[in-house]
Image: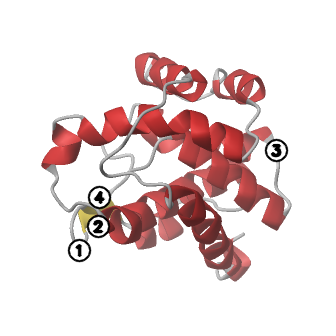
Amino acid sequence: MPSIAVHMAVAKLVGEKINITDQLFIKGNLLPDIINLDDSHHKIDGKYFLIPDISYFKEHLDLKNNLYLGYYTHLLLDKYFLEEYLPKYTTDINNFNNGTIYKEYDLINYEIVNEFNLDVDYLTKILSDYDVDVNKNILENNIKFLHSKNKGNTEYLKSDIMEFIKDISNTIVNDIKDLGDLI
């Protein structure tokens, strides 16, 4: 799954394209990673990694609710990131398990925040107030990473991540439009 900055950039782009910019949609875009729920992603086998079962969530989420539409957007991004972007550079799950990928997130978040003009203070305010049971430590770490100004070279996350964010936002918008009556 991608970093908080990637999720927030995609939330911004998708929200602008489908004309949903409310706080619930933004919150929903982080919720699967912080909610206290054993199987918040309902993972199934993908080509290389475990990915969210998108069909399951289409059936079980009220996608007319912007919080859950944001949740769904998050899951779509996870799926595409793990199926299309990351395998160009690695298919070794150990790069997640040993923390290598997560360390690289910290090195690219600042660039993503700047590239997509993310208002970190506004996002922090929105993300700090949930009405559901969330893991406060994970939430605080994500917010800390969103504020990170670390930079450095990465092995697995390349400069084409910016183009991926733009392209995948369009794909997700089309996926959402294909939901028809569900939204």
* First along the sequence among labels 3 and 1: 3
Q: Are marks 2 and 1 in contact (CB under 8 Å)?
A: yes
Gap in Å between the C-alphas at discs 3 and 1?
34 Å
Q: Secondary structure at mark 2?
A: helix
Mark on residue 43?
Answer: 4
Which mark lies nearer to you, 3 or 2? 2
Q: Is residue 103 above or below residue 6?
A: above
Quadrant of residue 137 within the rendered picture? top left
Gap in Å between the C-alphas at discs 2 and 4?
18 Å
Q: Quadrant of the C terminus?
A: bottom right
Type of residue at label 3?
Asp
Q: Position of residue 24 (x, y in %)?
A: 73, 42
Gap in Å between the C-alphas at discs 2 and 1?
9 Å
Q: Residues within 10 Å of mark 2 (few under 14, many from 20)?
A: some
Q: Secondary structure at mark 4?
A: strand
Gap in Å between the C-alphas at discs 3 and 2?
33 Å
Tell me: 31 left or right of 56: right
Type of residue at label 4?
Lys
Mark on residue 47?
Answer: 1
Quadrant of residue 106 within the rendered picture? top left
Mark on residue 22?
Answer: 3
Work out whether residue 102 can be spotted: yes
Mark on residue 87?
Answer: 2
114 or 165: nearer the viewer: 114
Which mark lies nearer to you, 4 or 1? 1
- Please report the residue visible at 65 percent of the width from the left and 38 percent of the height from the top: 113
Q: Position of residue 151 (x, y in %)?
A: 48, 30
64 or 143: nearer the viewer: 143
